Image (cartoon, rainbow, N blue to C red):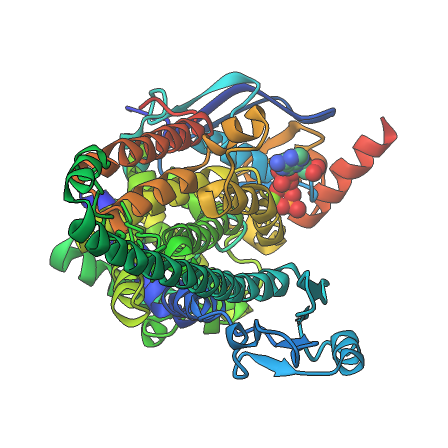
């Protein structure tokens, strides 16, 4: 036990005295997350749009001048070529849209805006039809009223001169039914409800859980791996092995020593994105912390394992494109449902995949323990396997009777 | 007389890929002696020491520490100083010694006292607060030695402990070795410095994977009919070249 704590204490001393590493561990993830927040969390900018052939068009009210610049066809074409506008709408029937087209995200913005205006166009058309119809109905009603007037006069005359004939006619006349009052026209508006999240959920909110996982994993991986690698290359590991310390104490010493920083780091990181960046989070902070904590354990144990196969720092960093980058892409940042089966299977071998799943459940879907225990368990299993291999590796290089 | 063997290596073979580094080396240290291991660079001294320690696996042959198969417990009585300094550069000298003492099972006042004691014996007591990163090469070497001494072991395996040290400090360190020996410790030390070799009780000469000569320096001088230890070395090398 004492050895274990001596190991852990030493690692804590090392990190605390190495201010740069400490900064990298704590501040760098915050900086990068802030950057990501600005990029993905910002409200999308408004598209620049214009209309042409608007003078004679009844559709003009649907295209407010605040949103659509009025231009001549020539002007519009020129502005589009200069990328001053993203699209212009030709109001001559049939309505046509001309897009700039080189940037898919701007295309999307322009189209969604124009589609909104087109809904207004439809309403205008509907209204126009309605007024035409009401006009027609009114003329018909007038004719009917005139006929009724004549009928009434005829009835009066008949009552005076042939009452019996009138009675027969009245008896056989079909019973006039009162026309139903026209039902109030229903509002054509979609009523949207969200099972999880709300319409304020932006890209950062859904990226956030994956991002937290990625950064925690990346930084712990780098620092843990390099620190164990140094132990090997400077020969201090040999010194440890020539001491009575037990194999598991070496590895667990690392786990505990780094674990403390992981707790601090994940606490700061999580509080930062939840309370400062205001990421969408309806789950419990503690649940988030637990996941982040066990994720970094798997990062640490994996990095120690891989440091065995590196003989210097550069080689350690060569694992980043191999181990971290695929995890970024398969972590759930991007939808992977359409990928070939083997790629998805690969994703299932990646710790960040599980942390993202768990964190999404916690933060966005607000599920408690029931929503993350499985992913958490798999992360724990990852760590256990890596730790066990680490201990075996050390044991193999130490031909001593235990 | 009850003679015990702190270290015993028998018929050790070791090869790295195609290169045979140790070829049937046997070595037994007697309690309370200083054994000097000499030999040309690359002859396998470090490899031999590491095998005796259990840091490296011999391809065949066996090693005994304190007359039994090496156990973790045996390491309590063993001080190892590697050819590289093997220190934690981010830590202060004190923290380094503190850590190495702790994993040897020391604690409390005893540990503190012992750290100051060994620091003094390698002349570093004023630099304990300094970061190792700010140490000179010689200071690191001495701190590394202090780390091997801190738990007062009975057996020392020191791989070129005095390389890069000035003559004054070197002499102090050898005085320390003789002092430790006087208290019953056994020391095996590799070196290239001939006046150090003369101070050993026994010398083993490792060349091309074999111990080609072994004995007290004076006996070896007589055997080869040369007036200094240095010339033993040269004589043997020449002999080897002739064959
Ligand atoms: N891990 C290793 N892999 C491959 N070859 C090695 C390894 N360690 C040592 N060697 C080789 O074994 C031989 C002996 O090395 P060793 O370090 O034991 O020499 P040495 O006698 O200590 O030399 P020096 O006096 O320079 O310290 C060298 O030729 C070296 O190249
Ligand atoms: Mg050597």
Figure quadrant of residue B142: bottom left
Quarter-of-image position of residue B89: bottom left
Residue, x 15% and y 56% (percent of image)? B110
**Residue B233 position in % (x across, y down):** 71, 42
**Quarter of the rendering occupied by the N terminus of chain A:** top left
Depicted A236 relative to depicted A35: above or below: above
Measuring from the top left, give residue B132's x and y in whole percent.
Answer: 43, 68
Question: Which image quarter has ligand 2?
Answer: top right
- Side of B54 where A111 appears, left or right: right
Q: In this rendering, would A33 be left or right of A186?
A: right
Q: Quick check: A118 above or below A80?
A: above
**Residue sitting nearer the eye, A251 or B126:** A251
Judge whether residue A383 can be spotted in this image.
yes
- Residue A70 vertical placement versus A1 (above, below): below
Q: On screen, A154 above or below B138?
A: above
Query: From the viewer's perspective, is A17 left or right of A271?
Result: right
């Amino acid at each position: 036990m004492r050895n274990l704590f001596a190991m852990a204490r030493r690692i804590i001393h090392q990190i605390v005295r190495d201010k740069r590493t400490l900064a990298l561990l704590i501040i760098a993830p915050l900086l990068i997350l802030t950057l990501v927040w600005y990029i993905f969390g910002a409200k999308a900018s408004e598209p620049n749009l214009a209309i042409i052939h608007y003078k004679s068009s009844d559709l003009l009210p649907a295209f407010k001048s605040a949103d659509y610049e009025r231009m001549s066809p020539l002007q519009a074409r020129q502005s589009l070529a200069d990328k001053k506008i993203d699209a212009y709408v030709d109001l001559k029937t049939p309505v046509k849209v001309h897009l700039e087209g080189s940037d898919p995200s701007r295309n999307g913005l322009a189209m969604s805006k124009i589609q909104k205006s087109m809904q207004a166009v439809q309403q205008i058309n509907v209204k126009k039809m309605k007024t035409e119809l009401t006009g027609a109905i009114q003329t018909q009603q007038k004719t009917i009223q005139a006929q009724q007037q004549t009928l009434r006069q005829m009835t009066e005359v008949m009552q005076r001169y042939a009452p019996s004939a009138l009675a027969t006619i009245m008896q056989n006349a079909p019973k006039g039914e009162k026309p139903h009052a026209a039902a109030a026209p229903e509002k054509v508006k979609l009523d949207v409800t969200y099972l999880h999240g709300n319409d304020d959920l932006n890209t950062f909110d859904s990226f956030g859980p994956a991002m937290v996982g990625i950064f925690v994993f990346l930084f712990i991986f780098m620092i843990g791996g390099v620190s164990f690698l140094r132990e090997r290359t400077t020969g201090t590991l040999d010194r440890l092995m020539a001491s009575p310390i037990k194999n598991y104490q070496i590895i667990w010493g690392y786990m505990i020593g780094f674990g403390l920083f992981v707790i601090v780091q994940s606490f700061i990181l999580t509080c930062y994105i939840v309370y400062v960046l205001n990421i969408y989070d309806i789950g419990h902070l503690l649940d988030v912390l637990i996941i982040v904590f066990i994720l970094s354990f798997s990062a640490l144990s994996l990095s120690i394992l891989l440091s065995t196969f590196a003989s210097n720092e550069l080689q350690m960093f060569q694992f980043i494109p191999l181990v971290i980058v695929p995890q970024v892409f398969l972590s759930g940042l991007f939808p992977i449902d359409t990928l070939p089966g083997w790629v998805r299977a690969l994703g299932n071998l990646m710790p960040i995949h599980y942390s993202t799943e768990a964190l999404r459940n916690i933060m966005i879907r607000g599920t408690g323990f029931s929503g993350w225990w499985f992913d958490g368990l798999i992360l724990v299993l990852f760590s256990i396997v890596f730790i066990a291999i680490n201990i075996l590796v050390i044991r193999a290089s130490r031909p001593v009777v235990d | 007389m009850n003679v015990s063997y702190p270290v015993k290596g028998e018929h050790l073979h070791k090869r790295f890929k195609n290169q045979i580094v140790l070829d049937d080396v046997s070595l037994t240290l007697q309690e309370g002696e200083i054994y000097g291991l000499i030999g040309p660079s690359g002859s396998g001294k470090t490899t031999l020491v590491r095998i005796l320690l259990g840091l490296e696996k011999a391809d065949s042959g066996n090693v005994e520490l304190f007359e039994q198969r090496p156990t973790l417990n045996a390491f309590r009585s063993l001080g190892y100083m590697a050819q590289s300094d093997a220190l934690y550069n981010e830590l202060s000298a004190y923290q380094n010694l503190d850590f190495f003492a702790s994993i040897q099972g020391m604690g409390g006042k005893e540990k503190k006292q012992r750290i100051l004691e060994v620091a003094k014996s390698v002349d570093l007591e004023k630099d304990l607060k300094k970061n190792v990163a700010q140490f000179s090469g010689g200071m690191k070497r001495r701190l590394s030695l202090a780390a091997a001494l801190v738990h007062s072991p009975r057996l020392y395996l020191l791989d070129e402990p005095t390389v890069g040290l000035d003559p004054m400090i070197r002499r102090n360190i050898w005085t320390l070795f003789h002092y430790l020996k006087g208290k019953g410790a056994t020391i095996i030390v590799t070196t290239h410095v001939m006046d150090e070799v003369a101070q050993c009780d026994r010398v083993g000469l490792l060349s091309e994977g074999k111990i080609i000569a072994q004995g007290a320096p004076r006996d070896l001088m007589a055997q080869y009919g040369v007036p200094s230890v240095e010339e033993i070395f040269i004589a043997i090398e020449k002999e080897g070249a002739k064959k």
